[in-house]
Amino acid sequence: MFNLAISDPASRAALLYTYPMKFGIHSEQYQNNYSKEEEKKFTQVFGELTSEFAAKMAEGVHASDESVQELVRQHYEFILQFWTPDKEAYKSLAMTYILPSPYRDSYEEVAKGLGKFHYDAVSIWADNNL
């Protein structure tokens, strides 16, 4: 499972990206043909995005706020490197952040309530943009 003893929130968040799981209706489309350098960059970017979501939540910024919605756009752009979800698929991915799953558990380790915050933000963005 996860090594949640890691104290740095960005490193804990990166575990969400690197943990090998299959979720979502299009997960079988993911093919990992990336170099170690690309994987390292993906992990860094995902960890930074997750930390930024956590910071916005900690500041009390609403999921519908323009700054949070910009983070969702960046998250969606990140996801596009691996597959192209439609509105329902993207919202389904975000659902794994709140339903019992290792994703939810990892988000909760980064910040309590982060999975729900991210889910809400994704739902708003997907409804408005996909």
Image: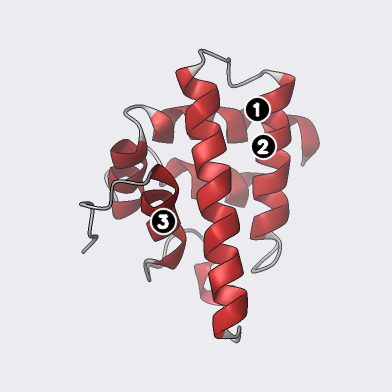
Q: Secondary structure at mark 1?
A: helix
Q: Residue sitting at 64 percent across and 58 percent down? A: 79
Q: Amino acid at mark 3?
A: Leu
Name the residue located 27 percent from the left edge and 52 percent from the top edge. 6
Determine which of the numbered discs, if any, sits on residue 68 in the image: 1
Mark number, residue 71: 2
Q: Position of residue 93 (x, y in %)?
A: 51, 50
Q: CA distance from mark 3 to mark 1?
A: 19 Å
Q: Please indicate whether residue 34 sits to the left or right of residue 117 in the image.
A: right
x, y percent for residue 81: 69, 67
Q: Is residue 127 visible?
A: yes
Q: Are marks 2 and 1 in contact (CB under 8 Å)?
A: yes
Crowding at mark 1 (Cα within 10 Å: few <14, some 14-19, many 20+): many
Distance from Cα at disc 2 to Cα at disc 1: 5 Å
Query: Is residue 105 left or right of 68 when viewed as pictured?
Result: left
Image coordinates of residue 44 in percent, x first then y, are 55, 59
Q: Amino acid at mark 1?
A: Val
Callout 2 amino acid: Leu
Instruction: Give the mark, 3 or 1, whose residue is nearer the N terminus.
Output: 3
- Labels 3 & 1 near each other (Cβ < 8 A): no
Establish if 32 lies above or below 11.
below
How are the colours assigned in the image? secondary structure
> First in sequence: mark 3 or mark 2?
3
Q: Which residue is mark 3?
A: 16
Say which quadrant the C terminus sits in: top right
Which residue, as the protein is rendered here, is positioned at the far right?
Answer: 129
